[in-house]
Image: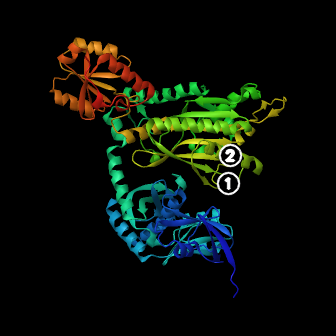
Amino acid sequence: MYEVKLKVELEDKVLEVTQGTTPYDILCDYFKDRKDVISCRIDGVYSDMSSEILKDCKLELMTFEDDGARDIFWHSSAHVLGNALVNLYPDAKLVHGPPIEEGFFYDVDVTDPISSEDYEKIEEEMVKIMKKNYRFERVIKSKEELLEAYRDNPCKTHFIMKGVDKESSVYRNGDFFDMCLGPHIRSTGVIKAVKVLKNSSAYFLNDPNLKSLQRIYAITFPSKGMMDEYLKRKEEAKERDHRKIGTELDLFFFSKYSPGSCFFLPNGTIMYNTLIEFLREEYRKRGFKEVITPNIFCTQLWEESGHLQNYKENMFIIEGDTFALKPMNCPGHCVMFRHQDHSFRDLPLRLADFGVLHRNELSGTLTGLTRVRRFQQDDAHIFCTKDQVKEEIKGCLEFLSFVYGVFGFRFELVLSTRPEKYLGSVDEWDRAEKALADAMDESNMPFKINAGDGAFYGPKIDITLHDALGRRIQCATIQLDFQLPQRFELKYRDSDGQCRTPVIIHRAILGSIERMMAIILESFGKRLPFWISPRQIAIVNMGNPDYVGKVRSVLARFRLDVIDDGNTLSKRIRTAETSGYALVCVVGKKEAEANEINIRFNKSNRNIGLYELRDILDRMADEKVELDSILPIDKVSISK
């Protein structure tokens, strides 16, 4: 039989393969040592490792470090969890098992309640399935076959009736199968370690009026070493849980009287306002104009913006559906832009807003400061011409790099491009995507491309932050928007006096102030950066009230507390250190006579002149750096 030969571009090679060859075949034939490959992309599309290659293409072999491949790995692991649940609970009806930010879950309709006592046997059953190394096999079934297969599962039949036209795929491994579009890893044996994390109740389709289900969360890895590292990080995270630190530092609390809305105590309010003022200072330097917009708008605004049709379930609607608390600032900024006449000379117009936002998150999803109902963002919208997009994006990227650099956070960039359903012309999208890509290239910022994942109204740059515990968190966003300017009929006059439609750049760097506070607390623990700490200086007083008064006066700019509780010197120092003070100082007779302060830092202590210390602290606060970056503690000399 005549064999059709195809060219496959892979890394820096062009391979000649027979039509029908799979990515797994290529991996085995050419890259036998690549044990880290778990998935692939064919011409930019994530695919099964067993997919037959039918035409010339570009092939990419993906590892667990790739976001999309990791989602595929965890989605495949959810199938293994579903298989284990069906084996253990014969009456179990599987509903929904997606990957999430950290692992995956499966919603299941089962008679017997599942508790933490069941975790071990679920893990053991999953390990059995993993060791069997079942292949994930894609099988096409007609709608009628699917309805018959799931005739006793009303949740699955709902999905079939709603989402399947004539046929759809299921994935089989061994005797188990589950309706799914894929793709998947090659086999269950690729999964090497599993841990069931927690369980909870959940409603079908997140609707409290529908069936109550049980949700089991788990996580898996392609090596036991990765699992060990993850569990170690989890233990560290428990100690650094922002809710625990928030209580210990008297920062905030939550109450049943306003679920999902934080009560910030004086210390927490200091930290919150310091973050906002940090952004305000930068706004003044970078040409942003801060505005204030209402908290409540009539629903006509949300109809005009499209949010009422697509986001109503997450909004707080009041007064008989005629008003709503705002869940975002962009429609209000469009009203503000439309209120005034604009020429091309006014652009770019950069509007910033710290307005209070409310989103009606489900009670089961509320988690400390990371998921709340009431919050503020460092929200900004840039109204500009299409020709200005690239330079504005470069400015956003530089701003982002500066702010994250202050905290020492690393980040990754991903360009999400035109989806299947989109607003505007292909030419508009191509030019916008090129502007974003050029901006990142010219800013010397590497990025990946997530093809087809842009919003329908414009391409975007997704920014993933890496915190001190190695977790990946999305906070910032840079989003082009062609839609809102058209929906609100926004116009500016060009140099010829013709009316043109501007482009909007949605931009947030910290994202939610609440969430960023949680990230900072969990990254730094109690020893927060000096400039943002509500507990900047602790003065341990050894019986010199007059000199302590002078110290307070000289260091009046800073947040300073005196520890004078009658305990021994060592106990008072220990109290200050464990209470999260950024700088611990001792004042005794010797210091008073010499006009000095004894500073304790990194298990060392040195004396330094009071006014010299004030100057150093001014630099620390202004430049947002720590003491050892200005004056290494082992080089601090005793003042004469």
Nearer to me, 378 or 144: 378
| Image coords of residue 372 (percent x, y) | 47, 40
* Residue type for callout 1: Pro
Front residue (pair 152, 96): 96
Q: Is residue 433 above or below residue 491?
A: below
- Residue 534 — which label? none
Question: Mark 2 packing: few (<14 Cα in 10 Å), some, or many (20+)?
Answer: many
Residue 64 position within the rendered picture, expressed as x and y whole percent measured from the top left: 48, 61
Residue 305, located in which quarter of the rendered image? top right
Secondary structure state at the residue bearing disc 2: loop
**Position of 72 relative to 266 (above/below):** below
Of residues 471 and 254, the one nearer the viewer is 471
Q: Quadrant of residue 408?
A: top left
Q: Which residue is mark 1?
A: 419
- Residue at the spot x=69%, y=38% of the render? 389
Q: Secondary structure at mark 1?
A: loop
What's the amino acid at mark 2? Gly
Horizontal side of 28 relative to 566 (left or right) equals: right
Say the numbered circle drawn on residue 458.
Answer: 2
Neighbourhood count class around disc 1 (C-alpha, 10 Å): few under 14, some 14–19, many 20 upward: some
Please determine whether, in this image, residue 483 is positioned above or below residue 557: below
Task: Give the residue displayed 50% in from the left and 35% down from the top.
Answer: 403
Q: Position of residue 91 (x, y in %)?
A: 44, 71
The count of marks equals: 2
> What residue appears at the point 68 percent right and 49 percent down from the top-left corner?
456
Q: Identify the image quadrant of residue 565.
A: top left
Q: Earlier along the polypeptide chain: callout 1 or callout 2?
A: 1
Split into 4 quadrants, where in the image is the N terminus? bottom right
Residue 298 appears in view: no
CB under 8 Å between callouts 1 and 2? no
Identify whether 428 is placed above or below 18. above
Residue 20 in view (yes/no): yes
